[in-house]
Image (spheres, rainbow, N blue to C red):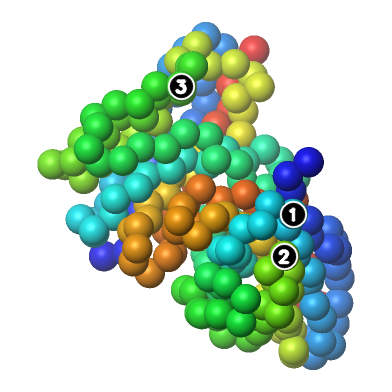
Amino acid sequence: QQQVKQSPQSLIVQKGGISIINCAYENTAFDYFPWYQQFPGKGPALLIAIRPDVSEKKEGRFTISFNKSAKQFSLHIMDSQPGDSATYFCAASIRGGSEKLVFGKGTKLTVNP
Amino acid sequence: EAQVTQNPRYLITVTGKKLTVTCSQNMNHEYMSWYRQDPGLGLRQIYYSMNVEVTDKGDVPEGYKVSRKEKRNFPLILESPSPNQTSLYFCASSFLYRRGAEAFFGQGTRLTVV
């Protein structure tokens, strides 16, 4: 019930292409869905986040799509660049609940020049 | 500069030798937590703290201890480390009203127990 399932484990995209990472959850009490970006040798950093009352949120080249009925959300990276190469984690949390941030297992994105 | 500082960044130790990984944040955050990151397993929460003197177990607390005597510091203690605690550890902090979800992470501590 507390899991967040993330796919794919790894993704290779050509420069300029679209990167898509998918996540699914079971617990309908989750009400906040952040994405974290982690570069090698660094800690994860908050990239973008969405609440379930909206279906899409866009920040620059990064977009979260949210499907509440399917309990799925995804990260789209438009015009992918080599500098986007990193590991991406989706996550979910329950505000006012257990205070825990539940992470997916991560997707290693490689953008080839 | 707003940051979460962990020390040391790298540590090799032997089984059973007590160690402490320090974590300090300068953002006046109430909420702090420790995660371990293992290949194929993602980030798993070890312990968290909602404020001074308030701590609770996360998903994988066995073999670890924490304390929160000051708001800015949240050390992770391994009293008798074992090889299965070899991992990459991250400390994170956030404002309590963000419920730990909008977290700032430290640079990580790579621990090897031999």
Query: Which of the numbered marks, if any, corresponds to residue B26?
Result: 1
**Mark 2 sits on what residue?**
B72
Chain ID of residue with mark 3? A
Chain ID of residue with mark 1? B
Count of picture labels: 3
Residue A75 in the image, given as x and y percentages of width and height: 40, 31
Residue A31 in the image, given as x and y percentages of width and height: 29, 50
Find out whether the residues at labels 1 and 2 contact each other: C-beta distance under 8 Å. Answer: yes
The residue located at (33%, 58%) in the rendering is: A94
Circle 1 SS class: loop
Residue B95 in the image, given as x and y percentages of width and height: 54, 55
Q: CA distance from mark 1 to mark 2?
A: 6 Å
Q: Amino acid at mark 2?
A: Arg
Residue A91 seen? yes
Query: Which of the numbered marks, if any, corresponds to residue A59?
Result: 3
Above or below: residue A45 compared with residue B47? above
As drawn, the residue found furthest toward the left would be: A69
Labels 1 and 2: the sequence-earlier one: 1
Q: Amino acid at mark 3?
A: Glu
